[in-house]
Amino acid sequence: MTPDGAMTDECIETAKEDLDAVKARLSCFMGRMPDTETRVAEQTAPDVNERIARQIEANVYYYARHPEEIDQRLNELEKEWDIERALETTFSAVSLSGFFLGMFARRFRFLAGMTGGFMLEHALHGWSPPLPLFRRIGIRSSREINLERYALKALRGDFQNVDKDADPAEKAGQAVVAASINSPHG
């Protein structure tokens, strides 16, 4: 810098190099981050992911045979909690419990900090201690819920890629494909 506070060309060049180095480090770090849409599935046991996928297919097949029930199922899906909501609620409850219990017994104070760490881990990488249990009991990601939602909408005729006159099994398969194509996550 010059005495009057202006930056010299050398200072500007050094600042640019430093900024480029920071950007490179951040992009390297961010490059290792899993995709937002797939991070939960990546952290879930393959057999659990397969069971959830089979259940979605079974649900779609059922509603292909019972189209009069599709609207009711779509309403149920609107109310279904996804894994993010379940984890956020769990972490908040544990953190608040740790905070209030910590007012009376110091040993509970760690709960508030621990849950914050687990929530950060989940936000960054898609894993947290309750995730395997929640997935095993069938709590789905928003992507999985949306797959079923869009497949049911395809069955109902909201999309053009489903032959309404096809047999239920073929129609269900077409609906899942149409949902994958038409979904904002597909």
Image (spheres, helix red, strand yellow):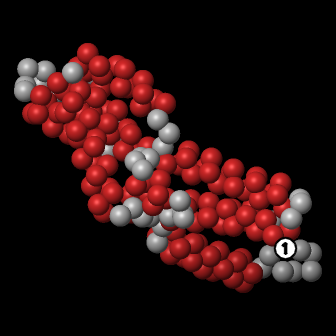
Q: Is residue 90 something one can see in this rendering?
A: yes
Q: Residue, x 23% and y 27% (percent of image)?
A: 63
SS under mark 1: loop
| Residue 161 horizontal/vertical position (percent) | 17, 29
* Residue drawn at point x = 31 percent, y = 33 percent: 150
Q: With respect to residue 35, does 18 lie above or below?
A: below
Q: Is residue 44 left or right of residue 67?
A: right
Rendering quarter of residue 77 = top left
Q: Is residue 173 above or below residue 99?
A: above
- Residue farthest along the front direction in this orientation: 105
Residue 109: x, y in percent?
A: 80, 65
Split into 4 quadrants, where in the image is the C terminus?
Answer: top left
Residue at screen point 8% across, 20% down: 165
Q: Nearer the viewer, residue 96 or 125?
A: 96
Position in image of residue 6 (x %, y %): 84, 73
Residue 167 drawn at (x, y percent) = 7, 27
Q: Residues within 10 Å of mark 1 (few under 14, many from 20)?
A: few
* Residue behind mark 1: 6
Image quadrant of residue 72?
top left
The vertical placement of 22 against 58, above or below, is below
**Quadrant of the image containing the N terminus:** bottom right
Residue 174 visible from this viewpoint: no
**Horizontal relation, residue 22 to residue 64: left or right:** right
Going by the image, does 25 lie left or right of 185? right
The residue nearer to you, when weighing 108 against 24, is 108
Q: Give the total number of marks visible in the rendering.
A: 1
- In this view, 154 is above or below 95: above
Task: Say which amino acid is labelled 1.
Answer: Ala
Rendered residue at 32%/40% (across/down): 147
Q: Give the residue furthest to the right.
A: 3
Which is more toward the observer, 60 or 9? 60
